[in-house]
Image (cartoon, rainbow, N blue to C red):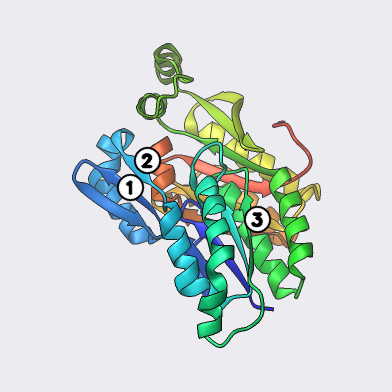
């Protein structure tokens, strides 16, 4: 059976990895003033756009995910011919309408695919599953990588579906932002009043950085640490311990950074995490944060994703 994999462009994985494994991307378009870029996970284009627009005006951006009709067209024009079963994995539905758009599109796709496949000489049925990863940033990468691993191992769609849903339930994404004022401005633009001016001003004045944790679609702070570098170091060391203790559900850790990757690699704790992953045969992915991610959390933020039943954020 030909199994296809679809992710949206907020899934933080390197574009060469996605292309190598024939993963289809649902682009998210970002508009800042008159500047428009469809995020196709092109790191060079993202960094150029970042330098030109995001640093000063990113909090004013509008993000436009694929519509129901665009998703329907993509499937009926190509994917229902190329594949027999497709897994479409989206950013958390609590953060974006992509899951709902894809779910709505799936009804029309499953109703209209037969003439398209028949015209291509294919008589077998087509099926698809829309999966809410319940995560964002590097967290989305974990289910995508696991779906590729399962497909390459020859697993059936029912077994893949059960496993991917289990992984999504246990995926954890952690993020350290650089600029709380930016996050507050962005939150207000989207109508989210959860980051108060007082909290942003106090945190910035004292250089306090929160460590944010996204799990099962909900995001909350799990620590507040003085200084960006110390906060990142603690997050890297925490992740390295999870790796060394054998607490990961899948052999995968994903990192993304809102800027040049060489900046991330120079941060304290990075080398310890790299060495721990190498020693324990855990695959480590590194990518520039998606443009969608950067306009929401600001330049220079760092995120880590992995799957584990163990919760908490310990020393």
Rounded to the nearest angstrom, the CA distance separating label 2 from label 3 is 23 Å
Image quadrant where one finds the N terminus: bottom right
Whole-percent x and y of residue 309? 78, 42
Determine the residue positioned at 44% across, 15% down: 196
* Circle nearer the N terminus (1, 3): 1
Name the mark on residue 295. Answer: 2
Which residue is more in the foreground, 133 or 279? 133
* Circle nearer the N terminus (2, 3): 3
Q: Residues within 10 Å of mark 3 (few under 14, many from 20)?
A: many
265 over 126 or under it: above or below: above
Q: Secondary structure at mark 3?
A: helix
Q: Secondary structure at mark 2?
A: helix
Whole-percent x and y of residue 66? 42, 53
* Circle nearer the N terminus (1, 2): 1
Which residue is more in the foreground, 250 or 71? 71
Q: Secondary structure at mark 1?
A: strand
Q: Is residue 21 visible?
A: no
Determine the residue positioned at 66% across, 75% down: 125
Which residue ends up furthest to the bottom in the rendered image?
A: 121
188 to the left or right of 212: left
Q: Which residue is mark 3?
A: 143
Q: Which residue is mark 1?
A: 30
Name the mark on residue 115. Answer: none
Rounded to the nearest angstrom, the CA distance separating label 1 from label 2 is 8 Å
196 to the left or right of 140: left
Whole-percent x and y of residue 89? 59, 55
């Amino acid at each position: 059976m030909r199994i296809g994999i679809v992710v949206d462009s907020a899934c933080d994985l390197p574009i060469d990895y996605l292309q190598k494994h024939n993963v289809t991307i649902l682009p998210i378009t970002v508009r800042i003033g008159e500047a428009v870029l469809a995020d196709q996970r092109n790191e060079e284009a993202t960094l150029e756009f970042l330098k030109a627009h995001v640093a000063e005006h990113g909090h004013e951006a509008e993000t436009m995910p694929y519509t129901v009709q665009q998703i329907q067209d993509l499937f009926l024009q190509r994917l229902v011919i190329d594949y027999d079963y497709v897994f479409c994995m989206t950013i958390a539905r609590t953060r974006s309408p992509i899951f709902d758009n894809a779910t709505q599109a799936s009804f029309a796709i499953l109703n209209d695919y037969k003439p398209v496949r028949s015209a291509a000489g294919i008589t077998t049925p087509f099926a698809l599953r829309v999966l809410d990863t319940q995560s964002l940033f590097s967290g989305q990468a974990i289910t995508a990588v696991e779906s590729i691993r399962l497909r390459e191992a020859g697993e059936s769609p029912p077994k893949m579906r059960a496993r991917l849903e289990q992984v999504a339930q246990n995926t954890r994404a952690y993020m350290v932002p650089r600029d709380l004022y930016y996050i507050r401005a962005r939150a207000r633009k989207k109508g989210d009043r959860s980051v108060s001016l007082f909290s942003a001003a106090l945190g910035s004045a004292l250089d306090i950085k929160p460590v944010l944790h996204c799990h099962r679609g909900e995001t909350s702070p799990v620590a507040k640490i003085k200084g960006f570098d110390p906060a990142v170091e603690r997050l890297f060391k925490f992740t390295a311990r999870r790796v060394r203790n054998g607490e990961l559900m899948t052999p995968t850790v994903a990192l993304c950074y809102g800027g040049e990757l060489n900046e991330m690699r120079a941060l304290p704790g990075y080398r310890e995490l790299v060495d721990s992953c190498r020693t324990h045969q855990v695959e480590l992915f590194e990518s520039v944060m998606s443009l969608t991610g950067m306009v929401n959390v600001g330049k220079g933020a760092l995120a880590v994703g992995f799957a584990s039943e163990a919760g908490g954020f310990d020393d």
